[in-house]
Image: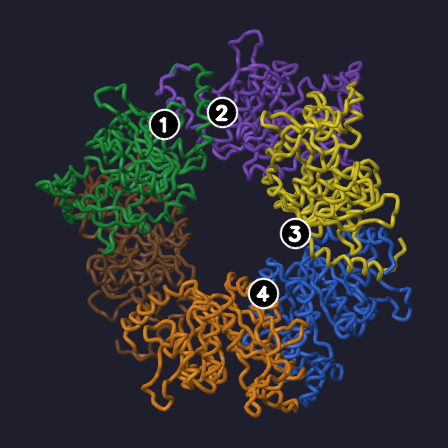
Chain colours: A purple, B yellow, C blue, D orange, E brown, F green
Amino acid sequence: MSFLAEDKASVLVEALPYIKHFYGKTIVIKYGGNAMINDELKAKVIQDIVLMKFVGMRPVIVHGGGPDITEFLKKVGKETEFVSGLRVTDEETVQIAEMVLVGKINTEIVSLLNHNGVKAVGLSGKDAELIKAQKHLAVVHENGILRKVDIGFVGDVKKINTEILNDLLDQDYIPVIAPIGVGEGNESYNINADYVAAEVAGALEAEKLLLLTDIEGIYRDYHDKSTFISTLTQQEARNMIHDGTIAGGMIPKVEACLRSLEAGAGKTHIIDGRQPHSLILEVFTPQGIGTEVVK
Amino acid sequence: MSFLAEDKASVLVEALPYIKHFYGKTIVIKYGGNAMINDELKAKVIQDIVLMKFVGMRPVIVHGGGPDITEFLKKVGKETEFVSGLRVTDEETVQIAEMVLVGKINTEIVSLLNHNGVKAVGLSGKDAELIKAQKHLAVVHENGILRKVDIGFVGDVKKINTEILNDLLDQDYIPVIAPIGVGEGNESYNINADYVAAEVAGALEAEKLLLLTDIEGIYRDYHDKSTFISTLTQQEARNMIHDGTIAGGMIPKVEACLRSLEAGAGKTHIIDGRQPHSLILEVFTPQGIGTEVVK
Amino acid sequence: MSFLAEDKASVLVEALPYIKHFYGKTIVIKYGGNAMINDELKAKVIQDIVLMKFVGMRPVIVHGGGPDITEFLKKVGKETEFVSGLRVTDEETVQIAEMVLVGKINTEIVSLLNHNGVKAVGLSGKDAELIKAQKHLAVVHENGILRKVDIGFVGDVKKINTEILNDLLDQDYIPVIAPIGVGEGNESYNINADYVAAEVAGALEAEKLLLLTDIEGIYRDYHDKSTFISTLTQQEARNMIHDGTIAGGMIPKVEACLRSLEAGAGKTHIIDGRQPHSLILEVFTPQGIGTEVVK
Amino acid sequence: MSFLAEDKASVLVEALPYIKHFYGKTIVIKYGGNAMINDELKAKVIQDIVLMKFVGMRPVIVHGGGPDITEFLKKVGKETEFVSGLRVTDEETVQIAEMVLVGKINTEIVSLLNHNGVKAVGLSGKDAELIKAQKHLAVVHENGILRKVDIGFVGDVKKINTEILNDLLDQDYIPVIAPIGVGEGNESYNINADYVAAEVAGALEAEKLLLLTDIEGIYRDYHDKSTFISTLTQQEARNMIHDGTIAGGMIPKVEACLRSLEAGAGKTHIIDGRQPHSLILEVFTPQGIGTEVVK
Amino acid sequence: MSFLAEDKASVLVEALPYIKHFYGKTIVIKYGGNAMINDELKAKVIQDIVLMKFVGMRPVIVHGGGPDITEFLKKVGKETEFVSGLRVTDEETVQIAEMVLVGKINTEIVSLLNHNGVKAVGLSGKDAELIKAQKHLAVVHENGILRKVDIGFVGDVKKINTEILNDLLDQDYIPVIAPIGVGEGNESYNINADYVAAEVAGALEAEKLLLLTDIEGIYRDYHDKSTFISTLTQQEARNMIHDGTIAGGMIPKVEACLRSLEAGAGKTHIIDGRQPHSLILEVFTPQGIGTEVVK
Amino acid sequence: MSFLAEDKASVLVEALPYIKHFYGKTIVIKYGGNAMINDELKAKVIQDIVLMKFVGMRPVIVHGGGPDITEFLKKVGKETEFVSGLRVTDEETVQIAEMVLVGKINTEIVSLLNHNGVKAVGLSGKDAELIKAQKHLAVVHENGILRKVDIGFVGDVKKINTEILNDLLDQDYIPVIAPIGVGEGNESYNINADYVAAEVAGALEAEKLLLLTDIEGIYRDYHDKSTFISTLTQQEARNMIHDGTIAGGMIPKVEACLRSLEAGAGKTHIIDGRQPHSLILEVFTPQGIGTEVVK
């Protein structure tokens, strides 16, 4: 790097008001997409989280499964069917999902964080019954009629028990959460990680929910970069879903933001995880990045 | 059950001195073998641990992998080679072992405990760097010469970081530990669960280490039930290994006990996990069961 | 004892839900009657209380005076007159009652408990002004007219100061209370121990009040064992006093239960102290024993 | 009173260095003799103790039995024999002593203190096993030979368990102790209150032991008031016992002081309890009063 | 001094109810006037405050500037103009006032207190932003019209931040406050010390505000000593200001009392600081001194 | 500023290891020289300290007097004499020094810090007797003979009482210390601020002492910029003072560093306060700046 010393100092000083503002605040980060696959991006996300911890924030990580689950199902010769974009999940499938999420992806993130000098602890929704879940029914359009279909062990969050999170946060650990929930009958559910992050942020009354995605944010017109939107109110977001401006894969992201705000989160952000150090840039610089959805 | 009320009371009163003695004491339980496979036995082990917790003990569980790892390796078409009884463990193998141990067996024990009214939290050796590990070399006898052989990601415990255990125990959680360690380069190691339990009990200066096994205990002469041994001192145990009285699969069990006593545990017990409620019987009744190895 | 090991375990496991339920809960025990006179029963009551303490309950004992006061009054040649079943209590009489209750019965219970491995502390109502009292007037029926008569230093509870109880309970002591109250002018009052226990249970918002008596419980028809009543609501109990089903010595017991429920206790129980280990059987087994009066 | 306002202020200011010095310090007071019999003196002792508490000291009271025990024994027609000045104490006698000490004298002191605005709690040596005791043998001189004689339940202090005292002191209670000890077999012992006070002061490492007596202090020549001694070292005191200068009833007082210093007390004082407010004068004024025995 | 020992004891005992009453209570003392100039009086005020601290009160000192500011302004050749009795205060003047108050008077009081065995800490309104201030406008009567005039850096209290006071009081320090406030733009304001004391007492919900003045208290008729007033209600005080009975320099003292009561103080007192030990006499004796203004 | 977002992130990430290292560590900063006079530099020092606080360090500030004391002495017409470079300090002089240091410079730094969002509290050595001092004698060379000369109220640190510092640091305040000490007789001493900072850093066992000066650091040859020294051991520093390489105004700076290391500080640094953000650059960047003196 070829910065002058004084320039470096300026950057640090510029970060000061953000450090002050977020001191002691809880920040929930949904970690997924490219930022979880590309090793270089992965290292930078880890650095960003460690920095957030050391300047006094209370980061909580929720991760998704990436392509690992699919790959593993293939490995054991399990074919997968999808209904309305959701994987039909029988008992064997949810078990493999749980093994991949809890026993591979979660442990890897935890050990990367610990290797960088913080104290991280991996959790699934089963630990201290963190995530109580119930069956999620898929909605299918058939001949113009909406019908709910049982697709197995795909779940919705019923309740977040924040006790274990607060106990760990108060003792300076970083909780890393795999999106597996537990049902009344002790059965496992695979849950969309964006929604888990949204509910966790809400239950903790987090200052911010940061969703790392593989897009830059929301555009009024996807083909015209100049229509990028920095801030959306809840109402605007709802309207844009309704009129189709927000569509496709963007819908669940925005819905997760809306749900999180309702449940108690302060602000929510859709951020481009493909940009190196996007977390730091969002949190520590005046420009911010991505699209925020706010009350 | 057809006990008279007064008989029930007698049993409870008989347990009183044991409850007093173990109040506030840490008990490390190695959970494995038949007690982990048979659903009825499993339910009884869970009840026993919950009872121990509710009468004021601080139980810590370390579990093994049972036949699940082998079965899963078979499922993905991975063939396994053994050297001196240890599985040759390449990177794919250790990853599958980790997935099975952390993402399947551990989460199941945790959710069974929680379902029974306590607060359990699953840990692997990566959480807060609980188990720092190093490579374990297999010893082979070749033409009368002992040679050490690299069999991959099979590990020895290098250090137990008790901080996360004490933090959880002090807040009334039951830690459930999968025997995966983490090396200097952040690589995973599969470690013998008996040894992990032994080291954890030592590092916590536990009152007792209880190894649930598939045998009744140690016999001076395996074929003569009347030679059953209730108590062994460290010295006697060492002598009996040396003179071959203790042999085969019994050696690592006894060595785990010896190591645990050295590292700081108070007493160690080899218990028959096939006997229903063997934990309760060992801890709460005057007879005790199995063989204890003591200082 | 000739139980099989497994049977013993079953009894302990059967107790588990009760242990869970009462963990950390306050249980007030009125100790009196045969259970205080018969040495064998006494030993069993002490064991029961110690067991309750060790499985995490917070027992509080209130004891009566048994025949010791009468015997001592006789010894000093003091004749006693009774009005409506209450002892006319002049200054010398209340002093002797206090000496017997505080200096003999209380110290004996305290030292028996301590001898069995818990930490008990004796209290009278004067300690930290635990029981503020006022004069109780006896009611006499004379020529069909009810008249209130001053019978000296017989008292009613005016206020329970729970501070010293909570301070001792929080530091793991078992408080043992003699039913002596202190009046505005610092004078002593002898108070019915059932009522003291009822008020203490109410003021502490205890989970349970257990009255050890010399009867099995309440019968609809005292001569027909088949009419035994396990549960009474407050309303039913009041009706049965009104219609005379509950009569004689049973009235003050039931009134103590009713008063305790009003004052804040959770449940109240009239238990047969002549049955060995009746406390344990009531608290730790599904059958329960005696008659409960509940809201 | 006819002081000028300014004179009053001077007295208060004069007390300041003593208040500073004793802030947070433990002071053990042996309360006995005339100060316990005369109602006016009694009221002043209570005021003095309350003042000590309010200016930040931690007073602990140990009381004797005065003539009440003798009077009560007479009442029940029990004749008493003395050996070497010690009462031969059979089981009935020790029970009456306990009843008088714990159930009459102790409760009276406790309620007087509470009536004056502090929080006092009465204790006997049985509470939380405060005073573990063993049999004290009387020494008789027979034909020039010393012989030890069993005189029953007269005890020596074997161990003071300070836990209950510290727990109460830390929560701002004043402990008031009756000199009854408990033996290995749970039997009661009557113990000399001066010795109990001495051992309690030692075990608590009290700043001061104050023995209220019915004499002014120690004289070199009892008939010559000008030979009054203000300060004695341990060595001087031992010499004066040896050469007979200290004799008769003075010996046990001085021996209690010597024992207390050995056991850990800071300073010990023999004070004239017949002088009104002698405690205040000793503690809060430069003159002090009585004789101190110091290291 | 020639008191008899017993008389001394009486004075101490007489103080007991006052010591009890004020135990743990916060007392705010405005220290000014002759008591701050005369060295002998000063020593006695310090002793009084130390005594208050040692008997368990929480004293807080607010001091004025006395003639030191005027003297120092003269020294640097700065002439001062007064408007309606208030010093016109330019930037140089407020800086000198701050230097005198914080760097001379405050440090001297602090070191006198520490020298007498307590732990005092000096504060100005700038420390932890204790006193937020705003400009005070002087009111002038010109041709029968009231006009507000800007006289520079003379301030009113806008807000007292009690956090630093409570933090220090809880750790047994005595806060000593110089009446300098800080404005929105970080500028200094000189504030009347009576008003600062009044606001501090209100914000702390102090038990008492004691204003040390150079008068004996309030008279109905200043020329007739027999018209001295011991107690005034708020309403009476307001009426007497309105009807001119309270006039001149007495008005701001009484207004400070009224403001303090409104803001949360329990009682307020105008005391003659010229009388030695007037604080002790007010607080520890039944007579009290001076005039109290109460709700 | 025209950095790219990613460059900014790099600077922040580069700071991470330093933030980690100093987390929870105490850093003592001697604030003086140009950095205290130039308003722009002053603002940057304040920003740097606030940043240090927000990333988890425990900064403690000790300030000097700059030219303000001299200016104020001139203002009041006080002429000053110097002996061996030290101001002859009579009572009036030390009083003016104290007023300037405590009542002007200290309050200004405190209010600037508070204005930037932290909680700062000003202290002089008199607060809670933080700095106990004794007279410093000047050393004069007269006719080849060293003679010690009394130059009045110039002091040396005798003892630092860290209690008030730790109490404030533990409650998240930044202590700001004026270099005034208090003598046995309660007299004030003006002390060299470098030495005060050195002793404070030693007594607190601070991680670092940072001396802000008006030079870049130490050169082996002052005229040759290439001889700049980054690190000196204690021994090297002592040798260079002895052989004259370190001379003039540099000697007391280096001696302060040596004294601080002896007294318990971890590392010491002589830093160029004229360089903007020199504190940040020293603490948060790999290059560091200035000269460090280490063990």
Q: In the rendered structure, which amino acid carries the disc numbered 1?
A: Glu
Q: CA distance from mark 1 to mark 2?
A: 25 Å
Residue E263 shows in this picture: no
Q: At which x and y percent is residue E189? A: 27, 41
Please name the residue that numbered disc 4 is placed on.
C161
Q: Residues within 10 Å of mark 4 (few under 14, many from 20)?
A: some
Determine the secondary structure under disc 1: helix
What residue occupies the far top of the structure in this picture? Answer: A223
Please name the residue that numbered disc 2 is placed on.
A283
> For the residues tagged 2 and 4, is the chain the same?
no
Q: Quadrant of the N terminus of chain C?
A: bottom right
Determine the secondary structure under disc 4: loop
Name the quadrant containing residue D216: bottom left
> For the residues tagged 3 and 1, is the chain the same?
no
Q: In the rendered structure, which amino acid carries the disc numbered 3?
A: Gly
Q: In the rendered structure, which amino acid carries the disc numbered 2?
A: Val
Please name the residue that numbered disc 1 is placed on.
F282
